[in-house]
Image: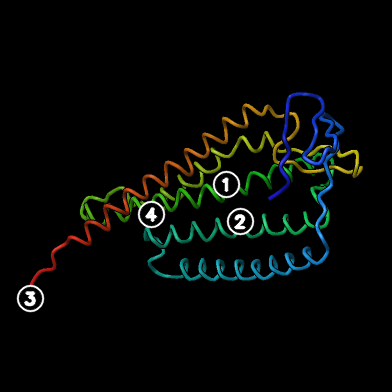
Amino acid sequence: MQAQLNMTNNTAATGANGTSLTHGPNFTLPNVFIQTDIKIGMTLAYAVIFVIALFGNSFGLFLVLKKSSSSSVTNLFIANMAIADLLLTVTVMPFQVAYFYRGLVWIGGAMGNITCKVLFHVIPVSIAATVLTMLVISIDRFYAVFYPLRSKLFRKPRILSAIIWILSFVLMIPYVFYSEIEFDTRQTAYVCLQVSSRTDTNVIRIFHICLFSILYALPLFIMTILYFLVCRKLWLRKIPET
């Protein structure tokens, strides 16, 4: 989503294009040049995707919540994913379009620091909520096929939904501490960085490895096994003769 910097613990580093990056209260980011025609094309593409995502997810959320059976497991989890998608729509897309024209330029002061932290916390929270929701849906489908009369765990979907969001917020709390504004001496303006220059790269590396394991590798492995078992169960089932 943004140009990645090779952060080190030294007071200075060199970017891929040889630009000097001075870490500390005042530092310099390399300029990211994007051709005008590419900017316009990507802006139009983001605008179309934004409208479709906004109205599509809003309409889906409206239908799910309007149904009398909105308290069911499936409907609540669909609503979860719609809310997560809406969060990504209203945060990532405007930020990315603004990046085309202004780079990482941000407002300064306490308000700038707060909004920077909120932005980079909301984005991974919505992703985590989507992944965890898909994982719970796969577990629900597994229990529905293998233990249809014993799936008491999923009789309180509202509690499960709350747990998913709380867990997502907790897992992504480190981003609140890693994200902050810094002053770019070249642009003479504050910029919002997801990983600031004062962050220990070893800590970031460990954190991302843990996130990859918890929110990608492990859920993917579990869902693959569960859906394989469900497909196998349904494929080998014997249809009663009439």
Q: Which of marks 2 and 3 is nearer the N terminus?
A: 2
Q: In this view, does 99 lie above or below 7?
A: below
Report the Cα–Cα distance between label 1 and label 4. Answer: 18 Å
Give the residue number, with chain letter if any, for mark 4. 137
The answer to whether the residue labelled 2 contacts the one labelled 1, judged by CB atoms less than 8 Å apart, is yes
User: What residue does disc 2 label?
Assistant: 87
Q: Which amino acid is tagged 4? A: Ile
Sequence-first disc among 1 and 3? 1
Front residue of 3/80: it is: 3
x and y percentages locating residue 12 in the rendered image: 82, 28
Give the residue pinned by disc 1: 125
Q: Quadrant of residue 221?
A: top left
- Looking at marks 2 and 1 on the same chain, the residue that comes earlier in the sequence is marked by 2
* Residue type marked 2: Leu
Q: For the residue labelled by badge 3, is the local secondary structure a helix, a strand or a loop? A: loop
Q: Residue at x 42, y 41 (%)?
A: 218
Residue 36, given in percent of the width and then of the height, sits at 83, 64
Instruction: Give the SS element for disc 1.
Output: helix
- Cα separation, mark 1 vs mark 3, equals 51 Å
Q: Which of 223 and 84 is in front in this view?
A: 223
- Between marks 2 and 1, how big is the CA–CA gap? 9 Å
Q: Distance between the residues labelled 2 and 3?
A: 50 Å
**How packed is label 1: few (under 14 Cα within 10 Å), some, or many (20 or more)?**
many
- Which numbered circle lies on residue 242? 3
Location of the C terminus (image quadrant)? bottom left
Q: Residue 183, how many percent across, how many down?
A: 86, 38
Q: In which quarter of the image is residue 41?
A: bottom right
